[in-house]
């Protein structure tokens, strides 16, 4: 009987076991490092692979990521022939879109300023404007970015979007290709990053992008820490090019205590809480992919290992 | 030639004059206190009446409020026969609904906690949940509350609503009557007040309401300062019944510097910025109501002076 390995320092396997067992009564779920005979493992649910890698699992067919991004799996290091799937369930997509709306509206309505003034006993009226008067630019129009762009539009924002390959989303002005990014940035007072982290997108939130954005714009990074060129952000805020940033992802998490992002008056640090796959709702997707992996069928949300997402 | 009086210490008449004159070229707009012969005035655009009242304007037919609420006009003191209209234009309704979404999502996603932690260099993970898992209760289902309830539902929240008389809004669980308020409150982790201020709703945000809400709930008051029983709010937060409150309206505005709401760790003060009528978009409504008042027709958004809204 083949077994499924569960390997994560962030997720609780006992949240996943009941809903998955309900759907797949003969599921054998083994939690790292107590996995018994490594040759029993044919599927692995993984946030980050163990330090010794996945090489010992000689019968491994598939890795089911416990997150929407897979850069932390270090795809090139994985055994050839192993297929990989991202975790993008309905709940994760919804909660992510809601977090985009929250953080974009917070800047649009100057709530960051009002919060600070509330602590300083300062009454400073700022004329409220409806969201339609603000353009939000979404970097990444895949499963997550596309859904978020649509919700931002529904709430009332004017929405632009950028992706590597051209896309069409109703009501969203879509840009693509390397030049398209800077054309979009020039129109947007708020830019949100929901890109996958690949060699091409590493450090893409940098001086060139910030210089293209209108003076006094805002950055919201919900992708990966590796998207951001940190020194460029600090300079762009110091010069006034950017008025503020909300960062949910970092190269090292938790963010180290001596990092300059902490307690920066114009940066809000959130502890990787933009979204998560709910075990109860994502269990169905996991079980479906275990079945597909065992039947040799393509997975739902299967990653193109060459592209990196 | 009759003239229109403009009387406000908050609004700039020169923002209103150009768009209104464009729509009504023969408009004569006179700004308090330089209104010339008081008998020329047949319509008045008013935020708050002057201290001496409106009695000197013997030919006054209509008062067009410069806000969505009219409690500050002191309706019983106005000359009999004068009709009153509220300013609820499309932009005001949209911006208000957006502010409801922002402040509700902020509490739902614990952004108030993350903001504080960001200043304290504290990484505290809180599992993100989609909005559908939170019930928001809207007090007031008129032009503003109804529109806000719909947008909260569209974004993803589970939404309840309460109004004096029974209402039906698709996707919103509606309650009415005195008992209905406490039935609704018992279901809602976030309650938003968008009621008109009348003798019946004075002080309605009080201990009885807070005691009906689930432990650890949040209050958002976007109505009027008079809706809130201030001492009850402070007690409810101190006891943990309420986890926090966002207050946009106050009995005295600007909020006095020695008020305990300022710098309270669980209260966010915003300076009456939830929404405003935009002169450029509301000008059309104003001009329409000037024409109707002069023709003796019912106004758009006309107030029932007996009900008070």
Image: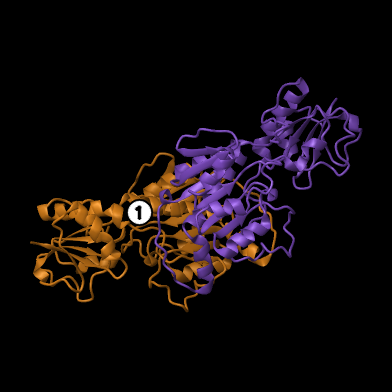
Chain colours: A orange, B purple
- Position of B76 relative to A146 (above/below): above
Question: A253 and B20: which one is in front?
Answer: A253
x and y, in percent, of residue A171 in the image: 44, 40
Quarter holding the C terminus of chain B is top right
Task: Give the residue furthest to the right.
Answer: B37
Residue under the point 43% across and 62% down: A205
- Position of A69 relative to B16 (above/below): below
x and y, in percent, of residue A83 in the image: 17, 59
- Residue A243's image quarter? bottom right
x and y, in percent, of residue B54 in the image: 85, 36
Question: B219 and B289: which one is in front?
Answer: B219
In the picture provided, is A287 more to the left or to the right than A227?
left
Query: Mark 1 highlights which residue?
Result: A92
Can residue A3 be seen in the rendering of this structure? yes
In the picture provided, is B253 more to the left or to the right than B218?
right
How many numbered callouts? 1
In the picture provided, is B11 more to the left or to the right than B232?
right
x and y, in percent, of residue A49 in the image: 23, 70
Chain at numbered mark 1? A
């Amino acid at each position: 009987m083949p077994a499924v390995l569960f390997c994560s320092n962030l997720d609780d396997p006992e949240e996943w076991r009941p809903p998955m067992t309900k759907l797949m009564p003969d599921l054998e779920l083994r939690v790292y490092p107590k996995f018994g005979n490594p040759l029993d493992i044919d599927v692995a649910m993984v946030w980050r692979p163990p330090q010794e890698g996945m090489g010992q699992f000689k019968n491994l067919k598939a890795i089911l990521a416990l997150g929407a991004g897979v850069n932390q799996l270090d795809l090139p290091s994985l055994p050839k022939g192993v297929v990989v799937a991202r975790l993008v369930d309905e709940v994760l997509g919804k909660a992510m879109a809601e977090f985009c709306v929250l953080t974009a509206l917070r800047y649009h309505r100057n709530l960051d300023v009002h919060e600070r003034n509330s602590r300083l006993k300062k009454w400073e009226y700022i004329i409220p404007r409806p969201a339609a008067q603000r353009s939000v630019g979404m970097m990444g129009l895949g499963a997550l970015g596309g859904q978020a762009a649509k919700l931002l539009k529904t709430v009332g924002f004017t929405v632009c979007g950028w992706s590597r390959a051209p896309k069409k989303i109703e009501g969203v002005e879509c840009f693509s290709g390397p030049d398209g990014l800077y054309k979009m940035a020039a129109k947007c007072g708020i830019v949100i990053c929901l890109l996958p982290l690949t060699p091409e997108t590493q450090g893409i939130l940098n001086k060139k992008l910030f210089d293209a954005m209108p003076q006094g714009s805002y950055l919201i990074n919900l992708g990966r820490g590796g998207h951001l060129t940190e020194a460029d952000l600090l300079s762009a805020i110091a010069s006034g090019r950017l008025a503020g940033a909300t960062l949910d992802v970092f190269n090292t998490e938790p963010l180290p205590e001596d990092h300059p992002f902490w307690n920066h008056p114009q940066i809000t640090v959130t502890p990787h809480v933009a979204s998560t796959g709910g075990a109860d709702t994502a269990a169905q997707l996991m079980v479906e992919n275990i079945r597909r992996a065992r039947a040799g069928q393509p997975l739902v949300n299967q990653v193109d290992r060459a592209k990196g997402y």
